Image (cartoon, rainbow, N blue to C red):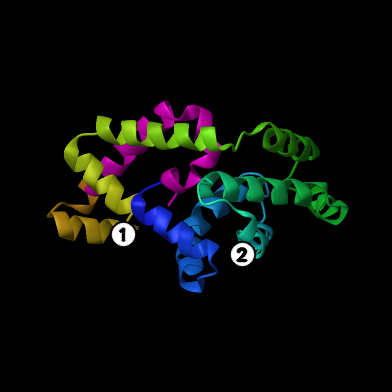
Amino acid sequence: MTKNDKQLFHLLLTGDETSFKVVYQHFYPRLYYFVLEYLPHHEVAEDVVHDTFLTLWQKRSDLQVDSNLNAYLYTLAKNNSLKKLRDERYRQRLLQSPSFHPLELELNAGALMRLETTESDFSEIEHLVQATLEQLPPQCRQVFELSRFVHKKNREIADELGLSVKTVEGHITKAIKLFKINLKDYLPLLGFLLVR
């Protein structure tokens, strides 16, 4: 975590609502895409992510200052998703959907149970993300960071850097390909980087 992340996390632990909103805005898209991989209904994925943040707020006093917020949130989202997959009413709803195969239900639950969301996994992911960013050509890296970390639209990036939108799209595509190769073992946790 960066120094700012640590300060934000400390404020969250003390019950600061503004820091909670910042954490929510930062992590919501990541967790949403993660949950959507396993629960193929948008409104259900939204509910699970909202429940994840509600649990974070309610249990913030149980967290340690040196906790990894990424690992904690993804573990909560994973567990909430598993609960939903085990919920009989939701299972019936899924099974009634013509686009959903019953085997998919078991595969999703199994994949979630095997998925590791420990602090060491997230330390490894952070290291791999940084190493992958360093492998990108400077302009490609700058475009990708503006797109995925600053959340700018392609047109805004093009205007800011004096590039065409097609060039911006090309840089993002190139970066995504490299991320998919370098972080193939962690793709379920990285939907926020790959989907926009």
| Mark 2 neighbour density, 10 Å: few (under 14) some (14–19) many (20 or more) | some
Report the disc number at residue 153.
1
Name which residue lies at 37% across and 38% down: 176
Residue nearer the viewer, 86 or 41: 86
| Mark 1 neighbour density, 10 Å: few (under 14) some (14–19) many (20 or more) | some
Where residue 121 appears, as percent x and y from the top left, is 53, 33
Drawn side of residue 88 relative to residue 41, left or right? right
Identify whether 148 is placed above or below 174.
below
Verify CB contact (< 8 Å) between mark 2 and mark 1.
no
Report the disc number at residue 57.
2
Report the disc number at residue 92.
none
On the question of residue 56 being in view, the answer is no
Magenta region: which residues?
168-196
Where residue 2 appears, as percent x and y from the top left, is 36, 48
Residue nearer the viewer, 72 or 179: 72
Element assignment for label 2:
helix
Element assignment for label 1:
loop
